[in-house]
Structure formats: C-alpha cells, structure tokens
Amino acid sequence: MNAPLVGDLMRRAAGSVGAAQIEAFQRDGAICLRQFLTGDEVALLRAGIDENIAHPSVRAKIASRPGDPGTFLEDFCNWSDNASYRRFVHESPLGIAAGLLMQSTTSRLYHDHMLVKEPGTQQRTPWHQDQPYYNIEGMQNCSMWIPVDPVRRHSTLEFIAGSHHGPWLMPRSFMDHQAKWFAEGSLADLPDIEGARDRYPILGWEIEPGDVVCFHMLTLHAAGGVDGDRRRRVFSLRFIGDDIRHAPRAWVTSPEFPGLREALPAGAAMNHSLFPLLWSRSAS
C-alpha cells in the first residue's frame, strides 16, 4: 500500500475514532461510527457481496428455516478470492479503526462473514456471544458489521451494553439450540433476554449505508428479521490485536481454518498468512 493512501486512511480513522469512541467501545462493547465509509467504498463492498451471492463458497449456508418467506444466506472467509472484498479490506480505514478501538499496536484480519436476509425473512439471529464459537483467546478484538442497505431499528443488530466484561456463556446451535461446542454445564446459559428486555441495557441503531457498527466478540448481540420491502445485505469483518492467541478446539469451529492447528501451536500469536497484518502503530 502506498504511503499517501496509508496516510489518508490513518487521518480518516483517527478523525472518527477518538478518545470518546474508544472509551465507549471499551465500556459498552459496541458503538456505531456514523458515515465512516465513503460512497465509493460502499459501492465496492456492495459489488463484492453481490458477487459472493452469485457465487457462494463451499462454506456458505442457509440459516433460515424451511418455510420462511425469505432467505438468510451466510458465507465465510472469502476475502482472498473476492477481488472487491480484497480491495475493501486493504484499502479502507477499517483495520486502522479496529486497532484504535482495541487499544492495540497492531490490527490483523481474523475473517470475513457475509450475512444476507432477503425481503420477508422472519428468522431472527438469537442472542449470543461470538468468541465462544472461535479458535482464539484474548480480549483485544473488534467485529465490524457493515450493511450496504438501510436497516430499520427493529431489524438491526442489538447489544447488551457491558456484557463483554462478563463470563463466556454457552454457545448453542442457532436452529436447534444444541451445545455442540462446550460440554453441557461447563458454561452458564444465556438469560431470557427477550422475555425481559426492559431489564437490560440494550443498544441498537437504525443504519444507513456508510455507517459501521463495531463490537467486541464477547458482547451479547442479536438481530431481527426484515420486512417484505427491505433487503439486508451485510458484510462483517473481524479483527484481532496484540493479545489474541491461537486456541485450537476439539470441535469444528465456526468458521473452520483447516490445517491451522498443524501450523500454529496452542498459545501462539496469530502470525499467519490467513490473518494479514493490516496496520501497525510503529509503521504509521
């Protein structure tokens, strides 16, 4: 990446991610950066998502139930094969912004995740934490949820403020609620948040293209379905910082990284070509 581009991206990131945003991210585990992306960046990402929809990878899955009036399509780990995704990852200020929010001296891409709910999709994304599904340990991480379509408040991603400071909770399969990762009883179960919403500090924002929602991988979050007149195409990027270490699991993680346990021992830093270094404070 050329020096003028790096300088421009650094200025943009620092202009939107200051002390107030870092404090809110560290305190609440979720913030929204309004109009952080340019129109050209949103158009580039939209093209990448549409290409991904037209040519899903072998990792793609339908996450909505049979009989749902809409369709919820997910796909993972396509940045290296999708030219628009690749440019978006390397030529946007997102990696730098993540590094600042994480209070890390480095920012690496962990993986990408496409989530598309077609009009009329009723399938909710249930309350969960992301990190228990992954093969990493550590607290310096940041996910970015980036819609390229307007998202109404009742369809947006919601968060329980401050929940990233609490314990890991039992990850369960979204469709049949099975404990396929950790043994039953080894982690506490999630509370019934939907049954007592007024008891929880719930954050969520109506979104316009260009907005970026940033959250910690341990922050409890969920999302609703979409209306019949509204499509919700989202690209999510997950970033990792200085203290993240490889934690091989005895089960298939989501996503899976075939061959990684042979390349990186348990406890190793995530220094691998699968996880490109996007920003280093020392090089800024």
Image (cartoon, helix red, strand yellow):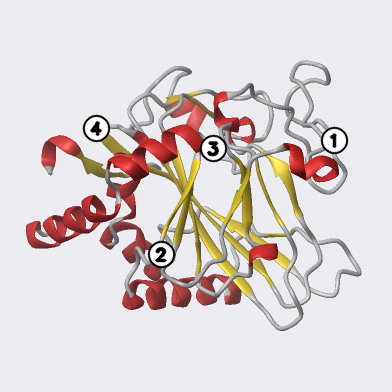
193 relative position to 99: left or right: right
Structural distance between the alpha carbons of marks 2 and 1: 33 Å
The image quarter in which residue 56 lies: bottom right
Q: Position of residue 77 (x, y in %)?
A: 51, 53
Mark 3 highlights which residue? 217
Mark 1 highlights which residue? 178
Would residue 273 be seen by someone viewing this image from the given angle? no
The first of marks 3 and 4 along the sequence is: 4
Label 4: state its secondary structure.
loop
The amino acid at mark 2 is Tyr
Tell me the quarter of the image containing the C terminus.
top left
> Which label belongs to residue 85?
2
Mark 4 highlights which residue? 105
The amino acid at mark 1 is Gln
Badge 3 crowding class, 10 Å Cα cut-off, few under 14, some 14 to 19, many 20 or more, is many
The image quarter in which residue 160 lies: top right
Structural distance between the alpha carbons of marks 1 and 3: 21 Å
**In this view, the mark in front (4 or 2):** 4
Does 147 appear above or below 259?
below
